[in-house]
Amino acid sequence: MALSLVRMVRLALVGLAAFTSIASALPAPPVPRSTVLAPDADPFYQPPAGFASEAPGTILSQRDITAAFFGLIPIDVEAYQLLYRTTAVNGSAIATVTTVFKPKNAKLDRFVSFATAYDSSATKCQPSYAYQLGAPQDSLIASVELLIIEIYLALGYTVASPDYEGPEAAFGPGRLAGMGVLDGIRAVKSFKTLGLTGNPMVVGMGYSGGAIATGWAASLQPKYASELNIKGWVQGGTPSNVTGTMYQLDNTAFSGLLPPAIAGLSKPSAYGAELDTFISKVMTADGQKILDSAVSECVTEDLLAFFERSIFESSFQSMGEDFIFDPIVQSVLKQNSMAVNKDETPTAPTFVYHATNDEVIPYADAKKMVNSWCNWDANVKFTTYASGGHATTEIIAIPDVINFVKNAFAGTTKSGCIANTELGSILNPIALGVELEPILVKLIDALFNLGEQDSKVKSDPVGVLSTNL
Ligand SMILES: *[C@@H]1O[C@H](CO)[C@@H](O)[C@H](O)[C@H]1NC(C)=O
Ligand SMILES: *[C@@H]1O[C@H](CO)[C@@H](O)[C@H](O)[C@H]1NC(C)=O
């Protein structure tokens, strides 16, 4: 079992670059696919009439699920899904789902909120769908990040993973995602079946697309959900400045993240009222086709569909570089850049980490965000990883993240702002204790494959790891 899981992680990660027939390499699923419905076809995702008058975070319905790795291997935990009321960008009520995993030895005074990087504007890519036994695996990042969730389960934390992009799967609008995370935490907190005590302590985390959600949850929490007992936030590879991120992604192997972001920002629950007319006016037929594909496909397909292409091409839209400097577009992008408003500064201890050589999300923008927050009296630990690229850093940082989470729950993080640089990319699974070793070994195996894909990794993670194990 363990070996085949490792092989599947490998396949899943390789699949990020080449969406080949993963399904044919895997054994037939033990449950017929038809028993798990995609969100658009599943009545569970539909809120009951009158839900808009409920408070944000109210549970609207609940169910048990069988959670599984890659849709195939059941995970031995209790798992639930909650449909809860949250808020669209324009303030109106919407409903989305969070998935809760509760391990056998769960600590009852705390839980972790994990924002997975699903990076897609198609509803079939909602993590709540991918987590179910028998679901097709269109969301490969969510599947791999489930291994990271498994670490927190092994440490005795209940973990909740919200569909923070909301019911329309709007990828990009950070404010929507931030409210989705905070209301998801409210829903979990009030879910009696878990037996959580008092006002449970919470640490929220996310990497990359998940850091959009987490950074915004951290920013909005003091005003939007001040009653929550947030002990810390963890955000790595943070796309803090949308304009900067767009430039960095354009015309690269990751340009395929841009069309789903444009489509996501243009959904009615996001900035459709502002952007819709403008977008449909400037898109070419080819550009519109790419946006249509972005609202029906997951990240792997999106990356292939717009590989090494530019959103400034005349074949995509008619305005050239002026496209993102149109005042309407700039206003939306600015509203979704972090650390612009002083009254949106996180108050809970926050761990921000980023690779200097991150080829996907600009390091300089994350650093600027940290500087602004620190000027506004935030409590931030900022770690710079001097080697490794975007994907590898998520895995390399795991021991530091675990330590921060433990300290945050214990209330022993240092106050004020501190910054440090880690020079080596060394992940030693034994150092974290034997109970985590098997999971970390699987992730290290995944890292080998990521290293091959991550062309700008300066160090040799395979060599570094093999000499240190
Ligand atoms: C975001 O990045 C753009 C492009 O690099 C820059 O012009 C803008 O000032 C940045 N915004 C913030 C809030 O830092
Ligand atoms: C406000 O948000 C709701 C919920 O997503 C959406 O249905 C509605 O169209 C939006 N209204 C405007 C004027 O943008």
Image (cartoon, rainbow, N blue to C red):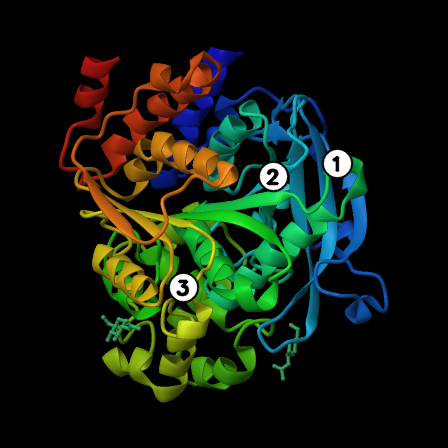
| Mark 3 in CB contact with mark 2 (< 8 angstroms) | no
Q: In whole angstroms, how far apart are the C-alphas of marks 3 and 2?
A: 34 Å
According to the picture, the residue beneath numbered tag 1 turns out to be: 194
Residue 356, can we see it? yes
Amino acid found under the numbered disc labelled 2: Phe
The quarter of the picture where the C terminus appears is top left
Neighbour tally class for label 1: few under 14, some 14-19, many 20 plus, Cα within 10 Å: some
Quarter of the displayed picture in which ligand 2 can be seen? bottom right
| Percent coordinates x, y for residue 230 in the rendering | 55, 50
Placement of 72 over or under 373, stated as above or below: above
Placement of 217 over or under 420, stated as above or below: below
Helix, strand or loop at mark 1: helix
Q: Earlier in the sequence, mark 3 or mark 2?
A: 2
| Mark 2 in CB contact with mark 1 (< 8 angstroms) | yes
Question: How many numbered circles does the render carry?
Answer: 3
Residue at image point 45% right, 47% down: 206
Task: Tell me the tag on residue 111.
Answer: 2
Helix, strand or loop at mark 2: strand
According to the picture, the residue beneath numbered tag 3 turns out to be: 259
Question: Is 403 left or right of 409, judged from the image as shown?
Answer: left
In this view, the residue in front, 468 or 110, is 110
Q: Earlier in the sequence, mark 2 or mark 1?
A: 2
Which one is in front in this view, the residue at disc 1 or the one at disc 3? 1
Residue at image point 56% right, 83% down: 273
